[in-house]
Image (cartoon, grey):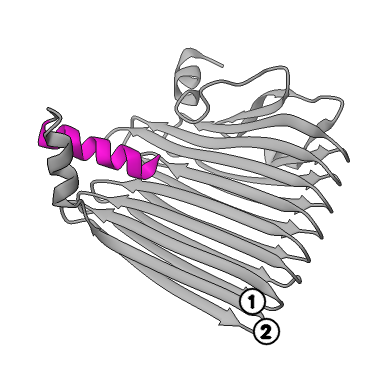
Amino acid sequence: MNSVEKDLLKNVIQDINYDYAYNIRSNSKSIERKITDNVNIVPKEENKGIDIIIKDNTKFEYIYIPVLITESGLTDIVYNDFYIGKNSNVYIIAGCAIKNEDVQKSEHNGIHRFFVEEGANVHYMETHYAEGHKHSSKILNPVTEIYLKNGSSMDIKSIQIKGVDKTKRITKAILEDNTKLEIVEKIMTDNNAKADTIFDVKLNGNNSSCHVTSRSFATGNSKQKFKSVIYGNNKCYSHVECDAILKDKGKVVSIPEIVANNVDANLVHEATIGKIAGEQLIKLMTLGLTEKEAEEEIIKGFLK
């Protein structure tokens, strides 16, 4: 990696432990890769992505898969498939950072599929970030598909820091018996940015469960739309909560849809949208902070 790529990488993954498996993709090509005894990374044809194959019973290993874009006018599409072996417990750290200093569009479309075998646990974190010319277009469109087999679980933390002008985020999941999915999504938009989030979860298995938490901060003239569709097709539990803070002319729309196809499906959706509470500002300002500093602390805590 050159110095620009290294600096950009720090915005989505601060520290990579190079003792573990990793694949670093820059401007549509893999530039660095390492495999281990338990984790194999197999490139797809024509740099279209990778297959990450994790052996059964792999415990507490990390896999890093960052994507960097520094070319203006580039549209990148990558297909990454994760095959998580039985009874594994692994940490996957992903992220995409765009630096676009021209007025052309730079775009990354990442399609990630997770096939999680019986008894496996996956901890997945992804961070999205963009910077560059104020008139350039920086677009990130992540698609995540999750297939949880009996007794497996997955927790996801997805964060969009700032600078992304447009994003469409789609997460689909199918859960079998005794599975658990937890998702925390945090999105910040500013200026004229737009962000659409769609969750489509099918709780097919007996005693399957899903918990989705969406936290949004919309400022400037930015717009966000959150839509969740949860299908309770068996004895299951789901809880979806959407919390949003507005500033300036920011807008947030929350659209819940819950479909109970079984008498023992327990499905809950909650949504709260509003501006920064005045009493929160006053409390922090009595500690010596300016109004702007108080706002920044509240937002930082909200998105933490």
219 horizontally vs 44: left or right: left
The vertical placement of 297 against 177, above or below, is above
Q: Quadrant of residue 163?
A: top left
Q: Tell whether position 292 is magenta.
A: yes
288 horizontally vs 61: left or right: left
Rendered residue at 50%/25% (across/down): 9
The quadrant of the image that shows the N terminus is top right
Circle 2: element type: loop
Rendered residue at 70%/66% (across/down): 208
In this rendering, does residue 137 appear at all? no
Q: Quadrant of residue 144?
A: bottom right
Rendered residue at 67%/84% (across/down): 262
Q: As shown in the figure, which amino acid type bears the numbered disc 1?
A: Gly
Q: Dot 2, how many residues are within 10 Å of its Cα: few (below 14), some (14-19), or many (20+)?
A: some
236 horizontally vs 103: left or right: right
The vertical placement of 7 against 127, above or below, is above
In this rendering, does residue 23 appear at all? yes
Q: Position of residue 121 (x, y in %)?
A: 74, 45
Q: As shown in the figure, which amino acid type bears the numbered disc 2?
A: Asn
Q: Earlier in the sequence, mark 1 or mark 2?
A: 1
Q: How many marks?
A: 2
Q: Which residue is mark 2?
A: 262
The reply to whether callout 1 and callout 2 are in contact (CB within 8 Å) is: yes
Q: Looking at the picture, tell me which residue is in the foreground, 22 or 136.
A: 22
Rendered residue at 36%/58% (across/down): 243
Q: Which residue is mark 1?
A: 232
Q: Position of residue 105 (x, y in %)?
A: 39, 43
Which range of residues does the magenta coloring cover?
290-304
The alpha-carbon separation of the residues under discs 1 and 2 comes to 6 Å
